[in-house]
Image (spheres, grey):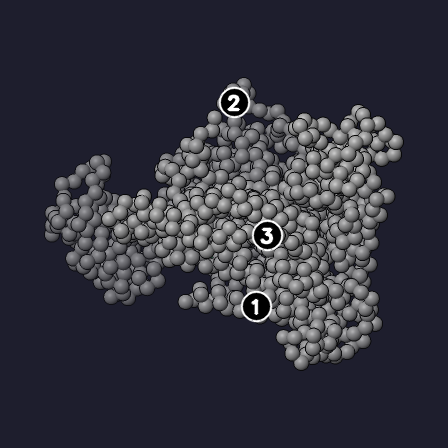
Amino acid sequence: MTPPSPAPTTASAPALNPVAWGWTMLGDVLDGPFRALQGHIGANRMAYVFLVPNLLVFGLFSFWPMILNFYIAFTGGQSVLLAERPFVGLSNFRELLDCPSYLDPRTCPVAGFSFWTGLWNTLFFAVVQVPIMIVVALVTAVVLNRDIRARGFWRAVFFYPVMLSPVVIAVIWDWILKRRGILNALLDDGTTAWNSLVGGPGYFGVLVAFGLLIGWPLGSLLARRVRTLPPWLLRLGCAVLAAAGLALLAGRSGLTLADYRPINWLIDTRSGWPMFWVIFVYTWGHLGFYMLILLAGLQAIPKDLYEAAEMDGTSKSRAFWRITLPLLMPTMIVVLVLSLIRAFQVFDEVYVLTGGGPGQATKMIIQHVYESAFIGDAKRYGIAAASSVLVAGLLLILTLGQLAATRKKAGG
Amino acid sequence: MITTTDVTGFLGARRGRSGLHWTDWLSYTYLAIGVMLVLLPIFWMFMSSIKSPRALVENDPRLLPYEQVTTPAPDGQRQLNVFELTRPDGSKADVAFVGPRGANARVYELGKPGDIFEAPRTALSRKDVISPRWENYTDPTIGSTQSRTFNFLRYFWNSTFVTVVATLMTLVVNAMAAFALSKYKFRGRDAIVLVIVATLLIPPTVILVPLFMTVSSLGMLNSLWGVIIPAVATPTGVFLLRQYMLTIPDELLEAARMDGASEWKIFWRIMLPLSMPALSVLAILSVMWRWNDFMWPLIVLTQSEVFTLQLGLSTFKGELNDNMHYLLAMTVLTLMPVTLVFVFLQKHITTGIANTGLK
Amino acid sequence: MATLELKKVTKTFGTTTVIHGIDLAINHGEFIVFVGPSGCGKSTLLRMIAGLEPVSTGDVTIDGAVVNDIPAAERGLAMVFQSYALYPHMSVRQNLSFGLENLKTPKPEIERRVAEAARMLQMDKLLERRPGQLSGGQRQRVAIGRAVVREPKIFLFDEPLSNLDAELRVQMRVEIGNLHQRLGNTMIYVTHDQVEAMTMADRIAVLKDGRLEQFGRPLDLYNRPANLFVAGFIGSPRMNFLTGELASTDQASATVALDAGGSVSVPCMAQAAASGAPVKLGVRPEHITVTDAGQGDVNLNVTITEQLGGESYLHGAMPSGEGLSVRLAGQTRVVRGDTVGLRLADPALRHLFDVASGKVFPPLT
Ligand SMILES: Nc1ncnc2c1ncn2[C@@H]1O[C@H](COP(=O)(O)OP(=O)(O)O)[C@@H](O)[C@H]1O
Ligand SMILES: [Mg+2]
């Protein structure tokens, strides 16, 4: 409580903090010219003054390029000056689209090969990555939405990779996935440890553990039916049977793994590992964002709905399928649209991690655009612009399709 | 003393239920695995970044930065590795490794360099000490002799400059536009809003070539301004700020107008302070975008003096595989600013992003 | 010195006209209240005076000078908003001094005025607080203080008390009255509450659907409402209206045949109207007395009685089915279900309206 002040304060106001003071001063200094301007044009037209800087930048660097892109797509040559670029009609598009078979990019011209390889890789990437990420993000969000301790901490940790730059993420995982990296070392150690475990007296430990793992729940299930025997006997019996079964089936040598040969995760040409890791790393870096949005969606579902369901005797899983998921649908659609559009534009992480390799195995469509225009001696801006037009068209169809689906959902 | 009940009590459900349901165990296990999957790679990289180049080349899988003890050779020319010798009788001694001879090694006991003897290699085990190598971070040779292309301080400065200037410009330019679009009525307003919202749907990645040409014709190639300015007028920013400003009551502005404030003053003294929540979300987003930006700088900046950290790192990664210790250290330094921002503003960032649905 | 004049002021939003040509002259030092049902255009009118909304046609003049094109900031008026519109990020002191700073008032002068206003409104101790830390009544005071320090030519109030609870409202009403006494400025006060209007105003402007229905002193409006709307709007409980038709007229009175039975004579000038024209007879509840059934001018079947101790209300239906209320001094023995006779008091307190135009037949002067 403040002590009663003896006299009404005619003294000056308390000293302002320097930030507020600086803010006020800066505003006052700028107020001079702006006020003069306002005197000339009137208060309402000041709106245009406020808009000008934004519209200037927006027009010059967003709107104008969008229109320019179409024009460049119909020009050839290597110059960045529009005036020096000859009009070539549809030839860029022809080079991209003149393929005997789109499914086999090798039948295309050079530019078409690069385009279709990138496109198919991107499609594969998006179709695999998006569902996996959404499911994992949903599961994580649902778990975090439970009555759980330290929710803020878990949420923050899952979100943290979103803050990291694609380059940093690529360096981290490159370091882990090198041929002589930690992952190979761990797998090697793991194999050795496992083999020495099942090679020695640990073999029986493995059998017992396996027996309990399989047999115990099986015995519990059985105990519900078979009332004549005591449950502990059933469980024990099942465990022993399971262990014996494993011993018979696999034996000692069957459990021994072959020596581990390090895999070149990002370079191995004969396997799908590079694409796998590209998907994994990208998901690792982006999951947290979608988890956060889904969690916000979950938390927006009124709690009393669940309480009402509980009063009705609805089971937890039924409540999830019949209440949570339907009410989460709008958020899910947002997440789906966003993640699909982003997946189609994937570039940074993949480019730094694999450079599109090995060969062209992880080359994405935006990398094709980038390399056509900016890499190598022949700067094929026309091809890049034409590819952009095609990609933009694809994205547009995707977005509109999504919007239509949303509309239908909302209407139905 | 932490007892089991304490732990269970901590983890346990809040709402009256005592003890943990099996689904709780499942949840916590899932979360723990997930957290490890997120943090271990970063932690591993950090631990690696304070290891010696030798430990990195040897690919030592131990977490801590162990380094083998060495001792100067009697001739003073080179360093000898130190091992621990276990004698047949079980006693142990530290020995310096002079050289191999068949399956044996020629060693001498520390302190007795004249007395070289042979010992079976299997009786030797490395003598390691923990010694974090902070020089990876502080080494003044970065950017001079060791690596011509990685001038960390320069890149750090470039990145900081781009991030700070671009964020300030983004805030001011977009706030002004959002103010005009939310608090004034004028012809064409709705059309402008529509165009801006429409461009939200058009990804910048599809206008790389024309944007490059525009920037190049303005002479901004290889200039940090070429990175800063094109993305200053972000539709996301206008949209986010406008939505927020729409919720600020018009009566406040009218009161200020009655108080004789000019339109600029209303913007500066009333609108901006009241939009702080939205402005700080945009500021955080902008810092994140700009600090982490890769593709656009990659296109605009081709000379290493103007590289940002991200460009420097990616170039460095491609070129110099034998300088892994520097690369890892610099990567840690690169992720440090956003990490610090995140640690301090974590709540703000997650709620802000969750509420706006933007990244 | 500040007079205000509105000349044929109209306001159109898009295609809808919400103010249809209002003429009004306000003298210096008057306390004027704009009253009317919500949505009738009171705020719009006030905002046009303030300069926050441009007038569509017509003129607003202050001290004889047309101010149509002068921006709000330069008209020298101050306004208290319904939501108070205090700057939430500034302390009370900053709220009060912001306007003076904009006018480049010297620092010592600002401090003097803020201190004086704070003393006048008893908020010396609140000066360093933010609006969020104040109660509703305190916020109200700050909003008024912000207007006071500006020493404006005219104070404008837009429903300033509607967010306060009933008790505080009565108290603030008195304080605003005192403020007017003390400062002597012209004040324009908007409200939808006719009690507020009656208690505070020197003159009341009654608005309906963007038109000025009547402009005059409170008791003039009560005693001589110009039309059905004002008659029904001013006074609480509402005036009763009994439908009927004009039976006969002479120079000094008109005789009305009531639908509820019986006929009543009203002193007024109604010769212009044809006999048989539909009319409404207006009688305030307090101008009716109760007798036995069949004894009075009309009968009333009582459906509700309200006993307040010091006074009582009867509500019921007449034989025609029309509702009617009566206010009686003291307590009554009438109970629900009783039928009583009503005697309409003093003929001078009866008002006769022409249904077709809604206007009153002018009373004898
Ligand atoms: N900016 C506006 N645009 C369109 N119609 C408006 C606007 N402001 C007020 N109106 C309309 O004008 C009429 C009068 O409004 P107002 O002056 O606020 O009434 P009140 O008497 O309750 O203060 C209302 O019907 C309202 O809908
Ligand atoms: Mg109003």
Query: Taking A118 as reference, is A198 left or right?
Result: left
Nearest to the observer: residue B325 or residue C30: B325
Label 2: chain letter = A
- Which structural element holds mark 3? helix
Query: Pointer 1: what residue?
Result: A398
| Mark 3 surroundings within 10 Å by alpha-carbon count, few (fewer than 14), some (14 through 19), many (20 or more) | some
Chain-order first, disc 2 or disc 3: 2
Closer to the eye: label 2 or 3? 3
Q: Which residue in the protein does label 3 denote?
A: A284
Q: Is mark 2 on a helix, strand or loop?
A: loop
In the picture, measured across the screen, residue A35 lies left or right of residue C126, that is right
User: For disc 2, does the CB lie below 8 Å from ligand 2?
Assistant: no
Question: How many angstroms separate mark 2 from mark 3 (CA)?
Answer: 54 Å
Q: What residue type is labelled 3?
A: Trp
Q: Residues within 10 Å of mark 1 (few under 14, many from 20)?
A: some
In primary-sequence order, the first of circles 2 and 1 is 2
Q: Residue A359 carries which label?
A: none
According to the picture, the residue beneath numbered tag 2 turns out to be: A2
Is A197 in front, or is A318?
A197
The kind of residue on which mark 1 rests is: Leu
State the CA–CA distance, disc 2 to disc 1: 63 Å
Placement of the C terminus of chain A among the 4 image quadrants: bottom left
Residue B211 in picture, x, y percent from top left: 74, 63
Quadrant in the rendering for residue A351: bottom right
Nearer to us in this view, C157 or A61 = A61
